Image: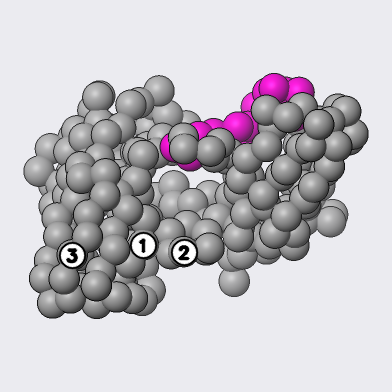
């Protein structure tokens, strides 16, 4: 298994600003994922982040809006850029890949409110 | 298109009653299906996966390819089962998860 932490746990931001969310895993993992959970909605995958390569974004999500870094096998960041109130969501990080089967382990989430 | 459908937003039962949370999927190929659970103020965690065919906390789920379903069942609900339950499907070669909308289970005393 893997234990995942995220920082910050929550934040309130002004529109037009950017926020970087950090995700730390307690062991080396091949794959990390970033999800968004809008109020009252299910989880939607934003992108898959593999170490040493560009993140792979899902339809509807672009790198300019959600740049992702994956500098090593235990860490990733997601930036929410030029925020608007529509970006108010919970952002979750997860980890998985070989060694974990298809199981993913989730962080506690970052609750973002954009005013 | 790959899709997971959970038709019930809320399922409300009394303690000791049987529970069935419905999940249907659309996927071309052999699906890998999971149930994840989120208890109040806790993170999302894996409950069970179809490939392991195990029972966790009294819950079971059987993959029915004919009906493209993966319903979650428990014969006798407990109050501590109250939580949000998500059915999920692995998609593609990168272990991406596609989640259903989730069903909130409320077990009343």
For mark 1, name the chain. Answer: A
Front-lying residue, A65 or A7:
A7
Labels 3 and 1 touching (C-beta < 8 A): no
Residue A46 visible in the shown view: yes
Name the residue carrying label 2: A39
Asked if residue A8 is positioned above or below residue B24 in the image, the reply reads above
Please state the extent of the stretch shown in magenta in the rendering: B43-59
Helix, strand or loop for disc 2? loop
Label 2 crowd bin: few (<14), some (14–19), many (20+), radius 10 Å? few
Front-lying residue, B36 or A27:
B36
The x, y position of residue A58, in whole percent, is: 36, 67
Asked if residue B12 is positioned above or below residue A27 in the image, the reply reads below
Q: Which of marks 2 and 3 is nearer the N terminus?
A: 3
Name the residue carrying label 1: A89
Front-lying residue, A21 or A12:
A12
- Whether B5 is among the magenta residues is no
Labels 2 and 1 touching (C-beta < 8 A): yes
For mark 3, name the chain. Answer: A
Position of the N terminus of chain A, as image quadrant, is: top left
Name the residue carrying label 3: A13
| Labels 2, 3: one chain | yes
Helix, strand or loop for disc 3? strand
């Amino acid at each position: 298994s893997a234990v995942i932490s995220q920082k910050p746990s929550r934040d309130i931001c002004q529109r037009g600003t950017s926020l970087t969310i950090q995700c730390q895993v307690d062991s080396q993992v091949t794959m990390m994922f970033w999800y968004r959970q809008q109020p009252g909605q299910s989880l939607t995958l934003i992108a898959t982040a593999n170490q040493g390569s560009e993140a792979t974004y899902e339809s509807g999500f672009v790198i300019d809006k959600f740049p992702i870094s994956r500098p090593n096998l235990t860490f990733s960041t997601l930036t929410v850029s030029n925020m608007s109130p529509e970006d108010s969501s919970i952002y979750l990080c997860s980890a998985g890949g070989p060694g974990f089967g298809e199981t993913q382990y989730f962080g506690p989430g970052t609750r973002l409110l954009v005013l | 298109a790959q899709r997971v459908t959970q038709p019930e937003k809320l399922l409300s039962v009394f303690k000791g009653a049987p529970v069935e949370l419905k999940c249907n999927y659309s996927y071309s190929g052999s699906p890998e299906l999971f149930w994840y659970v989120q208890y109040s103020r806790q993170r999302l965690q894996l409950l069970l996966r179809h490939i392991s065919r195990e029972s966790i906390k009294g819950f079971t789920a059987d993959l029915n390819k004919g009906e493209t379903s993966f319903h979650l069942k428990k014969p006798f609900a407990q109050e501590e089962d109250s939580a949000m339950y998500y059915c999920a499907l692995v998609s593609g070669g990168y272990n991406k998860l596609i989640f259903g909308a989730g069903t909130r289970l409320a077990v009343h005393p």
